[in-house]
Image (cartoon, rainbow, N blue to C red):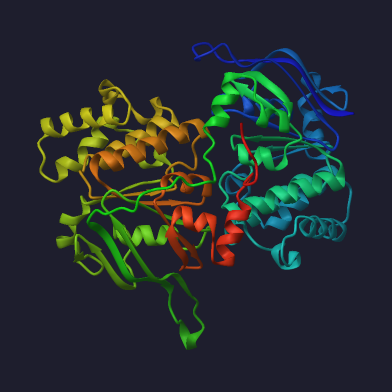
Amino acid sequence: MSVLEIENLSVSLPKGADRKFAIEDITLSVGRGEIVCVVGESGSGKSVTAFSVMGLADRRALTPVAGEIRLEGENLLEASDAHLRSLRGEKMAMIFQEPMTALNPVLRVGDQIAEMLEIHETLSASERRARVIAAMQDVRLPDPEKMYGSYPHQLSGGQRQRIMIAMALVLEPVLLIADEPTTALDVTTQAQILKLIKDIQTRKGMGVLFITHDFGVVAEIADRVAVMQNGRIVEQGEAGAVLGAPSHPYTQMLIGAVPSMTPPERQPATGKIALETRGLGKTYGSPGLFGTGRTVHAAQAVNLTVRRGETLGIVGESGSGKSTVARCVMRLIDPTSGEILINDENIATMREGRLRAHRRDIQIVFQDPYRSLNPRRTVGQSIVEGPMNFGIGRDEARGRAEELMRVVGLAPDALERFPHQFSGGQRQRICIARALAMEPVILIADEAVSALDVSVQAQVLDLLDDVRKRFDLAMLFITHDLRVAAQICDRIMVMNQGEVVESGPTAAVYANPQQDYTKALLAAAPGHHARFA
């Protein structure tokens, strides 16, 4: 029996949009006890589908013009706003991608779950609290009694996502919609959340509509798959059939872009050592009054070397110290101990006056390109700013920017446009061009492709590999995606709780990990056993 049936649904876009319909003539069903994954690139209509089911889409901009959405036989497009509000939580619930923006930062998480019960059921305060504690236990949260009184910022990303799941499930809905709920999580937390959703779905017999762009996730949990492109479903069927023998060229392209977990054999780099750290450490906190303070060793005794033309990957869970190492190397934060050698000169304790000359030698590309670019400046202004600050004339800087736009696969006349006029993948290419404009020796990529669609991710990875070879760069590549690390890194360094637990050539570490932590990381990669067509 189907809990959700979408039949011939079309949702129109406002006049002047790049296409007429956000979703067009889509037919899709979710059975009781079934997980259906909807996959596709950004703009394919995945989230519009989910928001239309929940009645959360702004009907002034996204107007249903044809078809039906039936929840247990009831057409939701004919329901009043008041009735839809009563169905949300009670019959259908949604988990969003970023729990920190979905949770109220000034309310305790227990009270936010209890609010669902207060709205939909008549219970005493003690009964509500008991139900909330039970829901928190159901999603495997540690010490629910204590966590009830915590605020969102006091929890980890994985714990916040579990709170969102508890909130969605506390009224035991028949349909759960999960919109990219694991995208921002590290690999082990992601594996736990996926297992949790599948376990709860099996126990409670819910239908789950799971939206993702990660085919590893699809391989891990999906019973059926629907592939969307430009608002249309281009292929759907049993998960094994779609993943193993995709029939539509778009599906074949998406699956072909999934990075393999098997690293290619690479020749050891022989270039000059461009970056070296010796005993690098960073400690936060202080002893406090009477020794009651708390100290956190974010990085401890980190030793690494990166040669010209080589990519060193740093992998590990959130909080492992990956980004701390990158920020110390950049001198965006000051290390507590150790040395940072760039071209054999120690910059670890160098004062800003002398350090400024070295800043052009080392550049960074961050995770979110939109936040990295000034929205009020053209991308051309952003690219030429750095070289001009170091004495390059405007005309020369402009010429360099035009050439770099060609290098990253964009037209030079796009320099006059603003960041919001580009896609996410194009913005990341612009950030790479901006970093290269400084003619650096070392390029740091800090989760530079984690927010991108799989096909765009593949393009940006190819670009990074190309510029590394073209400019003979030493690259420090920080990621929690082990598939990506496998394909782009010559050597790999695994971090846990601020310490390096294992390092070596990528192919050797993946084929024969020595440490239990490394084995657990590799085993947690979604779909690591899956064979894609």
* Quadrant for the C terminus in the image: top right
* Quadrant for the N terminus in the image: top right
Camera-side residue of 90 and 401: 401
Taking the image as drawn, is residue 155 in sight?
no
Q: Residue at x 36, y 42 (%)?
A: 372
Q: Residue at x 60, y 24 (%)?
A: 251
Q: Position of residue 332 (x, y in %)?
A: 31, 58
Place residue 354 in its image quadrant.
bottom left
Camera-side residue of 351 and 104: 351
Camera-side residue of 50 and 209: 209
Place residue 239 in its image quadrant.
top right
Camera-side residue of 229 and 383: 229
Q: Position of residue 434 (x, y in %)?
A: 27, 38
Residue 227, placed above or below residue 306 = above
Taking 514 as reference, is 286 left or right?
Answer: left
Place residue 178 in its image quadrant.
top right
Taking 19 as reference, is 333 left or right?
Answer: left
Q: Position of residue 467 (x, y in %)?
A: 30, 39
Image mark count: 0
